[in-house]
Amino acid sequence: MQSELDFITYLEAFIPLSVEAKTALSDVLKVRQYAKREHIVPLNGVNDVISFVVKGCVREYYLNEQTEEVVVWFGLEKDIAVSLPSFISQQPSHTAIQAIEPTKVIQVSRADLYQLYDQFHEIERLGRIIAEHYLMNSDAYIKELQTQNAAERYQHLMEQKPQILQRVPLSMVASFLGISGETLSRIRAKRVSR
């Protein structure tokens, strides 16, 4: 199936895989469709699959003490969606992953992935490289929140994932940037008036 081939090609950008490893991986991949607002990982659910976004848009969020949704990540085509701490520990996730629009993903279960780790050193190495990539992105997001002002964070989002602004409600963008909707409106108005 083309989606699975696209996923394997994506993975091979990190590390080449043997024919045997690709075949074994292809055998355990599942294609799944999620409706708009449907959860891939619900709040306090255990994340037992890794999802590769083929088509669509997802967000990762949590509820703060005021039970407001705080967005920490957006995923688009060719992004991997996973609550990594929950996936590794098999404990309830502190964040949820939800489709923002109708979304098609390719998934591999934790059980299947760990079995592949035991069988193929290159897949185990690939998992480590992707986990490192995930952790570096998380660290960069935290650093941005701590060191950049709202306008700088908005500029960075426009440079990295400009399509987010066409596909995601502005209230979610504001939450991701750690600002109010009003502040986001002011930043956007200033950019237009330049």
Image (spheres, helix red, strand yellow):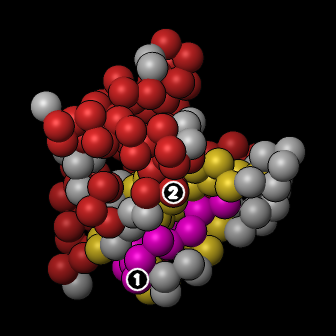
Q: Is residue 92 left or right of residue 125?
A: right
The residue nearer to you, when weighing 42 against 49, is: 42
Residue beneath the point at 49% across and 13% down = 147
User: Which residue is under mark 2?
Assistant: 171
The residue nearer to you, when weighing 8 against 68, is: 68
The residue stretch that appears in magenta? 96-109
> Within the magenta stretch, is there residue 101?
yes
Q: Is residue 129 left or right of residue 142?
A: left
Q: Amino acid at mark 1?
A: Pro
Asked which secondary structure carries label 2, the reply is helix
Asked which secondary structure carries label 1, the reply is loop
Residue beneath the point at 53% across and 24% down = 145
Which mark lies nearer to you, 1 or 2?
Answer: 2
**Visible residue check, residue 121:** no
Q: Which mark is residue 102?
A: 1
Q: Amino acid at mark 2?
A: Ser
Tell me where residue 154 appears, x and y as whole percent. 35, 35
Rounded to the nearest angstrom, the CA distance separating label 1 from label 2 is 19 Å
Q: Which mark is residue 169?
A: none
Q: Residues within 10 Å of mark 2 (few under 14, many from 20)?
A: some
Q: Is residue 156 left or right of residue 116?
A: left
Tell me where residue 27 appears, x and y as whole percent. 39, 77
Q: Is residue 31 above or below residue 89?
A: below
